[in-house]
Amino acid sequence: MILAPHEFVTLDTPYGPMRTHIVRPAAPGKYPGLVFYSEIFQITEPIRRTAALLAGHGYVVAMPEIYHEFLPAGEVLAYDQAGSDVGNKYKYEKELASYDADTRAVLDHLKSREDCTGQLGAIGICLGGHLSFRAAMEPDVRATVCFYGTDIHKGSLGKGQSDDSLARAAEIKGELLMIWGRQDPHIPLEGRRIVLARLDELNLRFAWHEVNGAHAFMRDEGARYDPELAMHLYRETLDLFHRSLGAGDR
């Protein structure tokens, strides 16, 4: 599907203005909406390409700049040690309530758009995988994909490194797709088992995939990228969204 030009909107949040990137199909009509959370590096070229892939299958995709309190609008961190250090620093300096307020602002924007059906999903990678997990707690999110979400098993997201994500998981009403790399040192086996046990305890609707991949195996840049795995898991992702959110009115 042909895409419309890349769009920006600035959304008001209790913690300041937040630039949000929008990618959507060019064809007129209404489409389901996805909030797509980036890694700690913000809206990099690999993240843009993933957003374009999702939008090309019939979605309005909104990508918030997760560190809008700390960085100028449009700033992207490099995929190097310096960029990683800055991204991890802000990950633990940002208020947990600010992450949640950002989510609500993006979801409300999507619902207000003339080109959105109001059927909403969430997807995220790395830090974004944790943020999409929290987005799943919003009552209007019907389907969520979490790619190797960091800090969920440790409860260490945000300022004070004490989040309530697993405690609040009972609030999730939609369907989850949880994806992990078995060779990912950030979420070891014991960490994955903590998350799995909690989802089983709550009897949530979810699918669970552990694949032979390192951290960032979905990122189409760098030595850890696994295109075969990425293609397979994008199909799983799109199957979930198509089934749960519908095809829209093109």
Image (cartoon, rainbow, N blue to C red):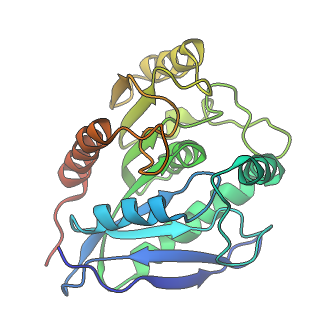
Q: Position of residue 87 (x, y in %)?
A: 73, 52
Query: Looking at the picture, does residue 9 appear above or below residue 50?
Result: below
For residue 121, what is the image quadrant?
bottom left
Q: 84 left or right of 176?
A: right
Q: Residue at x 53, y 22 (%)?
A: 195
Q: Which sits in the foreground, 183 or 193?
A: 183
Classify 145 as above or below 15: above
Left or right: where 33 falls relative to 126:
left
* Relative horizontal placement of residue 101, taking residue 180 as reference (left or right): right
Residue that appears at 49% across and 15% down: 197
Residue 202 vs residue 50, the one in the foreground: 50
The residue at the point 86 percent across, 40 percent down is 160
Residue shown at 25% from the left, 57% from the top: 245
Q: Quadrant of the N terminus?
A: bottom left
The spot of residue 214 in percent (x, y) is 49, 29
Find residue 205 and report its horizontal and vertical position in percent. 33, 31
**Left or right: 241 in relation to 33:** left
- In the rendered image, the quadrant that contains the C terminus is bottom left
Residue farthest along the front direction in this orientation: 223
Quarter of the image where one finds residue 97: bottom right
Number of disc labels = 0
In the image, 24 versus 182, the foreground residue is: 182
Quarter of the figure with residue 44:
bottom right
Q: Position of residue 193 (x, y in %)?
A: 52, 14
